[in-house]
């Protein structure tokens, strides 16, 4: 029996609710695809076997946020495809494309461990990793990060120009473009994105709706450290000092959320609370000497409509709102001998983003 034939031999799993579906009987292990044609062939066989594919797009450097999306995808599909690709067109010309963490060996290990767990649960499995080269993803022109760069791009405006897009003008053009390519290559029944990147979820939903992409967009919750810091592949650059001060963002958003939960609805009341916390922490850091402090700048704290992401002055309780923010952690001015300064020794600036959904109140 060929490797693929073995892979497609199936048996029935029974879900707790009594439904059954043909799931993969193979032992842990997945195919790694670097090119489009073999992946399409593999995907076609799954389709012909009535199996469903959930795609989890990532840039690698996997952490529990990614793994939780994969687990969700495995609960809702027979097969999970994970893409690992650091997409150049979503990095601006002055951004950290080269230094973005790349941890292939560790990633494969984490995926194998997770697939092992999935094998003993009544769920789908990780069956394919798509890790294309840039020549595969950008087959005609080299990927451009210039604002007026040439190439085939997907623009979702005005969403792409707000919030993160105001500071990172090519970011969502790159994200929408690479996701459209991935969706066209994999043709997944469902695609999985993390709440952590709220604007990305709104852009992708809009793209899928407006361009009639035949897939369902599913959003998984933000996974956090116990102290509230949202997990991110870039957190490895923070080090102890900046990591502690970086809590300013989640702490500020939580204060704002408290106001909403206590019945406040105006922008002033809700965001005022967030700005007070951010200002207090900023002043505290300014008052310290360079060997002790970690300076940062709040890029924005926003209270926006959940669909348009336009700023709101008063939250409509029937719609709720999105509280979101971004903070730039500056490089450490004076790293100390023996100090844990993170990858890059404290020299790499780190952009932190976070958000809280203010749920509609009936
Ligand atoms: P990235 O590799 O950073 O492009 O992220 C890949 C996917 O993982 C995106 O859908 C992110 O929103 C999601 N993700 C990243 N961090 C988290 C987190 N802390 N919790 C949940 N999802 C996350």
Image: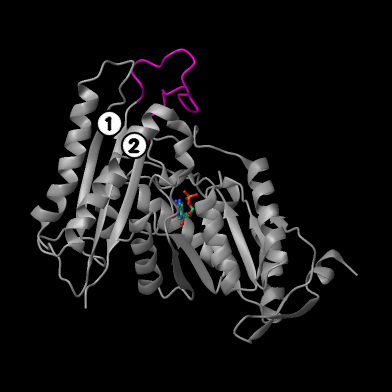
Q: Give the residues in magenta.
A: 331-350
Residue 299 at least partly seen: yes
Q: Position of residue 199 (x, y in %)?
A: 33, 57
Instruction: Report the predominant secondary structure element of the magenta stretch.
Output: loop
Distance between mark 1 and mark 2 Cα atoms? 8 Å
Whether 336 is drawn above or below 361: the answer is: above
Q: Position of residue 82 (x, y in %)?
A: 60, 58
Judged left or right of residue 185, residue 257 is: left
Q: Which residue is mark 2?
A: 246
Q: Is residue 116 or residue 70 the one in the foreground?
A: 116
Judged left or right of residue 205, residue 281 is: left
**Earlier along the polypeptide chain: callout 1 or callout 2?**
2
Q: Is residue 252 or residue 333 the one in the foreground?
A: 252
Asked if labels 2 and 1 touch by Cβ distance under 8 angstroms, the answer is: yes
Judged left or right of residue 360, residue 216 is: right
Q: How many marks?
A: 2
Q: Which residue is mark 1?
A: 296
For image coordinates 75% across by 58% down, the residue present is 29
For image coordinates 10% across by 63% down, the residue present is 314
Q: Position of residue 207 (x, y in %)?
A: 38, 67
For image coordinates 32% across by 61% down, the residue present is 156
Q: Is residue 54 magenta?
A: no
Q: Residue furthest bottom?
A: 18
Q: Is residue 105 or residue 181 the one in the foreground?
A: 105
Whether 298 is drawn above or below 188: the answer is: above
Q: Residue furthest top?
A: 337
Residue 94 at least partly seen: no
Q: Position of residue 210 (x, y in %)?
A: 35, 72
Residue 185: quarter of image:
bottom right
Quadrant in which the N terminus is drawn: bottom right
Q: Residue furthest right?
A: 1
């Amino acid at each position: 029996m060929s490797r693929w034939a073995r892979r497609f031999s199936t048996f029935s799993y029974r879900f707790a609710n009594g439904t059954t579906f043909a799931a993969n009987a193979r032992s842990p292990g997945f195919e790694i695809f670097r090119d489009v044609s073999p992946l399409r062939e593999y995907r076609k066989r799954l389709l012909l076997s009535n199996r469903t594919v959930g795609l989890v797009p990532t840039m690698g450097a996997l952490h529990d946020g990614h793994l939780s999306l994969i687990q969700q995808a495995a609960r809702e599909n027979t097969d999970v495809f994970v893409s690992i690709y650091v997409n150049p067109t979503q990095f601006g010309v002055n951004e950290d494309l080269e230094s973005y963490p790349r941890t292939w060996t560790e990633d494969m290990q984490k995926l194998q461990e997770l697939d092992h767990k999935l094998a003993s649960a009544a769920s789908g499995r990780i069956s394919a990793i798509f890790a294309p080269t840039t020549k595969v993803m950008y087959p005609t022109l080299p990927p451009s990060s210039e604002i007026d760069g040439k190439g085939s791009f997907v623009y979702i405006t005005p969403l792409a120009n707000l919030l993160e897009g105001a500071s990172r003008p090519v970011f969502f053009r790159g994200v929408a473009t690479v996701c459209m390519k991935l969706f066209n290559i994999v043709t997944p029944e469902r695609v999985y994105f993390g709440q952590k990147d709220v604007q990305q979820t709104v852009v992708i939903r809009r793209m899928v709706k407006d361009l009639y992409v035949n897939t369902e967009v599913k959003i998984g919750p933000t996974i956090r450290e116990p102290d509230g810091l949202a997990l991110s592949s870039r957190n490895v650059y923070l080090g102890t000092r900046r990591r502690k001060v970086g809590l300013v963002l989640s702490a500020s958003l939580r204060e704002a959320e408290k106001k909403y939960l206590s019945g406040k609805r105006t922008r002033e009341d809700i965001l005022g609370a967030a700005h007070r916390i951010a200002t207090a922490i900023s002043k505290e850091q300014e008052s310290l000497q360079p060997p002790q402090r970690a300076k940062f700048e709040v890029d924005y704290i926003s209270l926006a409509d959940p669909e348009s992401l336009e700023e709101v002055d008063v939250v409509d309780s029937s719609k709720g709102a999105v509280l979101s923010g971004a903070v730039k952690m500056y490089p450490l001015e004076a790293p100390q001998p023996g100090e844990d300064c993170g990858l890059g020794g404290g020299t790499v600036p780190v952009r932190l983003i976070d958000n809280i959904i203010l749920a509609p109140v009936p």
